[in-house]
Image (cartoon, rainbow, N blue to C red):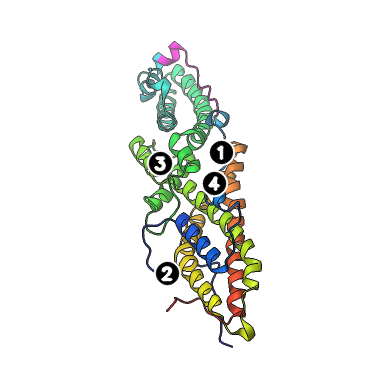
């Protein structure tokens, strides 16, 4: 008996040439062709489950931290005019300062922490000659401790509440495809950049760079696109595997000799699953593992809301496990069938 080619579940290869179709179209064509060759109707639920929305992410108001801020009296405010801190504090009290977007607020808090540190150092240095400066330096040290805690809350508000992140995490515009994953790799870097901002760097955040990275994240919407594709593959391959289990068993391959029907089925499997669906699965794997350390870090962050972390876990751990199991079950089903019929999953002649 000739050896049956093994289809790797863990590491997919990109095969063949692809047109402009989506994985949704590939799944629909795959199912329709199988239905025709086997002369069996698709499950009633199949068309309903080609694509279903991602679970809803909790409202931003539910996830938002309230940040009280530091109260500074007029005497202290006037005493700060000789260092940059006075200017930074005044910035926050303007009408624009009071209505900052989450990204602008984080950039401001970063700038404020730097100004607090510099002003504290300058006043402490002069404190030996001026007792008032020394006392104010001690007060600023207390402010800096509080604002350092507030900074982490502000970072969490950016991650959980900014429009760019909420779209990226919950509102895909498309499914993944081999040809058109706009800004996907740039989005990976941008997400890790946002993660790095929780470390309260010594230098203030570059506001322009932050906004640029957020726009990349918004444009690509990579996490939501990844999870929606993962969910679509899981739901539809599970239905097809269930349908095919008994149907493939009924296909005649006496003494390992493939019937014409078995050969046609092998061709359908190759043309649609191997050449069109499996490469998209390769991308799901690739980007899942690229982003896995980021999600692990976010799941460990104490200031990210439990509902936000529950959503992330649902997609990155539970959802990926279900997807992997669905893909493996589908491949195993075909391996068993091809082995029984002494066929290899090769391109049709």
Label 2, on which residue?
A: 15
Please say whether residue 291 is visible from this viewpoint.
Answer: yes
Circle nearer the viewer, 1 or 4:
4
Judging depth in this view, the residue of 300 and 277 nearest the camera is 277
Callouts 4 and 3 close, C-beta under 8 Å:
no
Density class for disc 4 (Cα within 10 Å; few <14, some 14-19, many ≥20) is: few
Query: What is the quadrant of residue 9 in the picture?
Result: bottom right
Label 3: which secondary element: helix
The residue under the point 36% across, 61% down is 19
Percent across and percent down for residue 203 are: 39, 38
Tell which circle, 2 or 4, labels the residue nearer the N-terminal end. 2
Q: Tell me how far mark 1 sits from mark 4, CA to CA.
A: 12 Å
Judging depth in this view, the residue of 52 and 294 nearest the camera is 52
Q: Tell me how far mark 1 sits from mark 3, CA to CA.
A: 18 Å
Callouts 2 and 4 close, C-beta under 8 Å:
no
Label 4, on which residue?
A: 52
Tell which circle, 1 or 3, labels the residue nearer the N-terminal end. 1
The span picked out in magenta is 65-77
Tell which circle, 1 or 2, labels the residue nearer the N-terminal end. 2
Label 3, on which residue?
A: 218
Tell which circle, 2 or 3, labels the residue nearer the N-terminal end. 2
Label 4: which secondary element: loop
Density class for disc 1 (Cα within 10 Å; few <14, some 14-19, many ≥20) is: few
């Amino acid at each position: 008996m000739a050896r049956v080619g093994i289809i790797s579940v863990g590491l997919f290869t990109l095969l063949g040439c692809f047109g402009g179709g989506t994985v949704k179209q590939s799944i629909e064509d795959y199912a329709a062709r199988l239905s025709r060759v086997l002369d069996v109707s698709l499950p009633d639920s199949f068309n309903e489950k080609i694509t279903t929305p991602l679970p809803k992410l909790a409202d931003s108001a539910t996830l938002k931290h309230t940040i009280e801020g530091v109260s500074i009296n007029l005497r202290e405010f006037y005493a700060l005019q000789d260092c940059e801190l006075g200017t930074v504090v005044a910035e926050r009290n303007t009408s624009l300062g009071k209505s900052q977007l989450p990204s602008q607020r984080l950039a401001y808090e970063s700038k404020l922490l730097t100004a607090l540190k510099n002003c504290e150092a300058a006043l402490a240095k002069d404190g030996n000659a001026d007792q008032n400066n020394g006392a104010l330096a001690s007060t600023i040290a207390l402010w800096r401790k509080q604002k350092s805690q507030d900074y982490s809350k502000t970072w969490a508000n950016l991650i959980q509440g900014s429009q760019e992140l909420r779209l990226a995490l919950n509102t895909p515009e498309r499914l993944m495809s081999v040809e058109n994953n706009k800004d996907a790799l740039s989005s990976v870097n941008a997400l890790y950049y946002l993660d790095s901002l929780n470390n309260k760097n010594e230098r203030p955040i570059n506001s322009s760079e932050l906004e640029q990275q957020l726009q990349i994240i918004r444009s690509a919407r990579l996490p939501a696109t990844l999870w929606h594709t993962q969910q679509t593959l899981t739901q539809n391959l599970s239905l097809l595997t269930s349908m095919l289990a008994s149907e493939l068993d009924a296909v005649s391959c006496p003494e390992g000799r493939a019937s014409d029907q078995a050969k046609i089925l092998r061709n359908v499997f190759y043309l649609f699953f191997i050449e069109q669906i499996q490469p998209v699965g390769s991308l799901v794997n690739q980007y899942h593992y690229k982003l896995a350390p980021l999600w692990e870090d976010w799941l460990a962050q104490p200031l990210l809301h439990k509902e936000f972390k529950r959503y992330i876990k649902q997609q990155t751990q539970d959802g990926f496990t279900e997807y992997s199991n669905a893909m493996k079950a589908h491949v195993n089903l075909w391996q068993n069938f091809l082995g029984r019929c002494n066929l290899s999953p090769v391109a049709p002649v």
